[in-house]
Image (cartoon, rainbow, N blue to C red):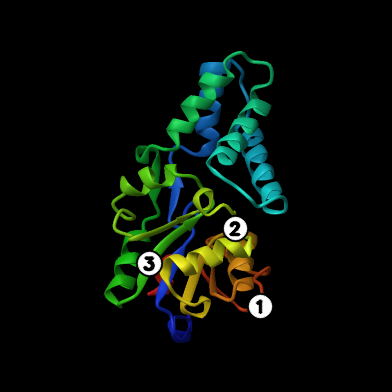
Amino acid sequence: MPNSILSDIQAVVFDAVGTVMYPNPSVAEAYCAAMTRFCHVDIPANTVSAAVRDALQGRASGDLATSEAAERDFWAGLIQDLAGESSGFQDCFDHLFAHFADAANWRCFPETEETIDGLHSAGLRTAIASNFDLRLNSVCDGLPGLKDVPHRVISSVVGWRKPDVRFFEAVCRHLELRPQQVLFVGDDLVNDVEGSLTAGMKSVWLCRNGDTLQAPEGATVVATLTDLI
């Protein structure tokens, strides 16, 4: 990575899911187990993965306003669609909503803690900024690699989801910095990279699979978080 990527940068802001942490068991595994237990239906893991992916992609191009209630309704609607007419929907939803609030069901990527420690040692501030709800606080508080990141910006609190520019403006207000002083790091081209570039930030696309052909102009591409340090 060119050394210039951190020039004039005062804070490095990370997306959460897929960038610094991931669910364990996977979303598909957790959903399949819950659907079997509470709804008595067996759904293939690839069907669940596709449904979640399509729903999230659809949100990125739709109404980007959000709230705690809107986030809860989104996940409830997704589970309801998968459960169909099953009478076990509510118990299934309650179980899964609590499941993903528990840090025991999440892991940091191996390089997360090293990278964040390295940035702090270099005198840079760090933050987590995510399309999530208040459950992100309990997750980060329970993960050693993230609990010491001092700033969190959550879409349900801001009222806007990435890639809306108002989300990134909220990040800058929270940090009391200009966009040019903030480096945003994420794995999603639309939500993280294009959104932060549009807001005037420097942007890093974390592309672990090496498929960088779609990298937008102005973004720096890394294969691992440790490339930042």
Of the numbered discs in the image, which one, if any, rests on residue 48? Answer: none
Where 226 sits versus 30, above or below? Answer: below
Judging by the rendered image, the residue that carries numbered circle 3 is 126
Of the two numbered discs 3 and 2 on the same chain, state the one appearing first in sequence.
3
Judging by the rendered image, the residue that carries numbered circle 1 is 217
The local crowd at label 2, few if under 14, some if 14 to 19, many if 20 or more residues have their Cα within 10 Å, is many
Q: Is residue 196 left or right of residue 99?
A: right
Residue in the picture at 51% in, 24% down: 34
- Tell me the quarter of the picture where residue 216 sits: bottom right
Q: Position of residue 203 (x, y in %)?
A: 54, 72
Tag nearer the camera, 1 or 3: 3
Of the two numbered discs 1 and 2 on the same chain, state the one appearing first in sequence.
2
In space, the residues marked 1 and 2 are separated at their CA atoms by: 19 Å
Q: Is residue 129 left or right of residue 118?
A: right
Q: Position of residue 56 (x, y in %)?
A: 64, 46
Q: Nearer the viewer, residue 222 or 88?
A: 88
- The answer to the question of whether label 3 and label 2 lie on touching residues, with beta carbons closer than 8 A, is no
Residue in the picture at 40% in, 63% down: 127
Task: Look at label 1 and name its amino acid.
Answer: Glu
Task: Look at label 3 and name its amino acid.
Answer: Thr
Judging by the rendered image, the residue that carries numbered circle 2 is 162
